[in-house]
Image (cartoon, grey):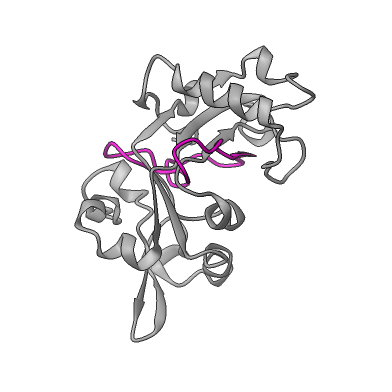
Amino acid sequence: MPMNAMPRIYSYKLSRDFGFAPNPFHGVCTLATCKPQIREGAQVGDLVFGFGSKALNLEERMIFAMRVTEKLSFQQYWDDPRFSVKKVSFSSSKAAAFGDNIYHLDRGQWIQEDSHHSLEGGELNKANLDRDLGSENVLVSNDFVYWGAGAVPIPDHLRVLDGDDLYPNGRFFRSRHSEIFRSEVARWFANLPERGNLGRPTCW
C-alpha cells in the first residue's frame, strides 16, 4: 500500500475466541485460519477488527484490532523461523497448544498439522481444511491490540460517523466504508494508548 493511501477496514464477529484465530501470542498477532475472504483481500497497512458476538456474550465489544504489517503464504509462514513459535506444541503451554502455523505442503499435498482445527487424535478435518485453504494467505501484525475476554466497547463516534458503523451487522464481514470513516478509524487506532496482548482468550 502506498504511504499516503487510506487503509481499508475489515470488521467481523468472532463466534469463538481460543487465541487461535486470531493468535495474539509471542508478540505478533496472526490470522492464519478462518475468514479466507479477509485473508485474501486485506493488504499491508489495512486494519482488521474482530468483535464479540452473541455466542460469546460479548456483543458490540472489540476483541482485537490489528494493522497488517506482513502478508505471507502458508508455506512462507511455515518455513519462516520467526514463526516456529506459532507451531503447535501440546506439551509446553496452553498458548502453544493453540498455535496457528498448521498448514504446509509435502510433495504437492497440503498437510494439516494436529491442531485446534484437526479432529480428535490429529486426524484431518476436511471441512476446516477446505475453508482455511479458501485463501493461502496469513495476515501478520506487530501493531495490534488484543483484549480477549476483556473486550472493550466500541467508541460511540465509530458507530454513527458519516452513516457508517464499525460493528458488522449480520454474520459476514464488512469492508466497505467511506473515506471519512476510514480516516477516523485509522486515527483512533493510531492513538490507542496500549499495544500487544492485553487479555486472555474469551474461551479459556
**Residue with the most extreme bottom position:** 107
Apparent side of residue 46 relative to residue 179 in the rendered image (left or right): left
Q: Position of residue 136 (x, y in %)?
A: 48, 65
Q: Which of the two residues, 28 or 43, is positioned nearer the viewer here?
A: 43
Q: Residue at x 68, y 29 (%)?
A: 167
Q: Which of the two residues, 125 or 132, is positioned nearer the viewer here?
A: 132
Q: Position of residue 16 (x, y in %)?
A: 56, 42
Q: Which of the two residues, 5 or 171, is positioned nearer the viewer here?
A: 5
Give the magenta range.
1-29
Magenta stretch: includes residue 125: no
**Quadrant of the drawing holding the C terminus:** top left
Label count reads 0
Magenta portion: prevailing SS class: loop
Apparent side of residue 182 relative to residue 107 in the rendered image (left or right): right
Question: Is 52 situated above or below 175?
Answer: above
Whether residue 59 is visible, yes or no, is no
Apparent side of residue 93 relative to residue 69 in the rendered image (left or right): left
